[in-house]
Amino acid sequence: MGYRIAVVGATGNVGREMLNILEEREFPVDEIVALASRRSLGTEVSFGDRTLKCKDLAQFDFTGIDICLMSAGGEVSREWSPKIAKQGAIVIDNSSVWRMDPDVPLVVPEVNADAVAGYTKKGIIANPNCSTAQLVVALKPLHDAATITRVVVSTYQSVSGAGKDAMDELWNQTKGIYVNQAPEPGVGKFPKQIAFNVIPHIDVFMEDGFTKEEWKMVAETKKILDPKIKLTATAVRVPVFVGHSEAVNIEFEKPISAEEARDILREAPGILVVDKREPGGYVTPVECVGDFATFVSRIRVDPTVDNGLAMWIVSDNLRKGAALNAVQIAESLANRGLLKKAA
């Protein structure tokens, strides 16, 4: 016997990817329902070889639903996640609304899978920010081996992290430039031209000069991995459709060589090491699209600090950064016998 699953926000990039990954990983599903806002009522989405017609979230009865995968944005989640949880479903939410709530576990299964048991307080489990998810997957095994004290990370984040409209904006600007149509910066998702450009600004600015995206990486890494870790981030949007990249410098309490780190990461769950010191001996965003893994390349000693390493981390942000992580959380619940039905 399998489970009854609801996917809220099924017409969005991440919602569609959740449906794909549930099918690809053969998650035991007896019944699956695609939900969205009323304006998307009847919109068709795919689940394997089946076609699902979206139902109206506001009219749906969640009684009997085991898991609700929520990817409809913060406002929808704030209103609906508690209501859905009260009807008995475990909500796995992809927005930022619940991540720092002390009564809601923030989970990356390769890092802190046992934390899923904390869902009982509110019936909600939070998915981390896409840039945080791939970072902590790589940091966790190294932290266990040599204790991380400080991390400096610069992100190179694809436009899909800002939704379908952002992907369309990059596409339209790129096409327009080739036919001498000047982009209109500030009209769409981005405050400046995104085609053939990079923008050091994701989410809103905070009083200290960092953006909220950068703050999320700091706060979420501390909650998921270790509150003692010091982390500073610069988040940058780049003209890439899918796949986030990160240049990371790590300081450790104990000595660790590049060779030791490479061996540790090769054995770590969810990671593929591609690190040849030659042209092309690393992974780029284009190559990671559609893959479940977090890729680590360019592992080397950082000679500017004691016990320092530098590396390059790449992952499909729609998968590990969002949809895959949510499905892995569901798998963790099932594997620990925390769902009502036996798979």
Image (cartoon, rainbow, N blue to C red):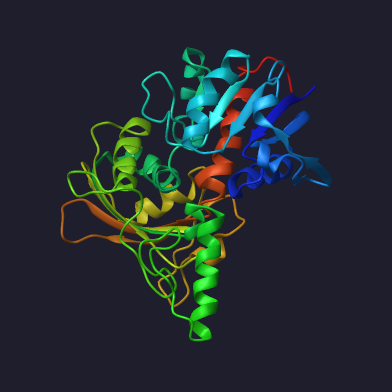
Instruction: Look at 44% across and 58% down and name the residue there.
Output: 189
The number of numbered badges drawn on the structure is 0
256 sits to left or right of 336: left
248 sits to left or right of 39: left
Q: Nearer the viewer, residue 342 or 205?
A: 205
Q: Quadrant of the N terminus?
A: top right
316 sits to left or right of 106: right
220 sits to left or right of 342: left
Q: Nearer the viewer, residue 166 or 68?
A: 166
Residue 257 point in image, percent of width and height: 29, 54
| Image quadrant in which you'd find residue 206 | top left
Above or below residue 264? Residue 180 is: below
Instruction: Look at 63% across and 43% down and name the residue there.
Output: 15
Above or below residue 40? Residue 166 is: below
Instruction: Look at 33% across and 41% down and name the residue there.
Output: 216
| Image quadrant in which you'd find residue 80 | top right
Above or below residue 262? Residue 23 is: above
Residue 163 point in image, percent of width and height: 52, 52
Look at the image and tell me whether residue 217 can be seen. yes
Residue 214 point in image, percent of width and height: 30, 47
Q: Quadrant of the C terminus?
A: top right
Residue 190 point in image, percent of width and height: 40, 60
Above or below residue 158? Residue 88 is: above
Look at the image and tell me whether residue 113 can be seen. no
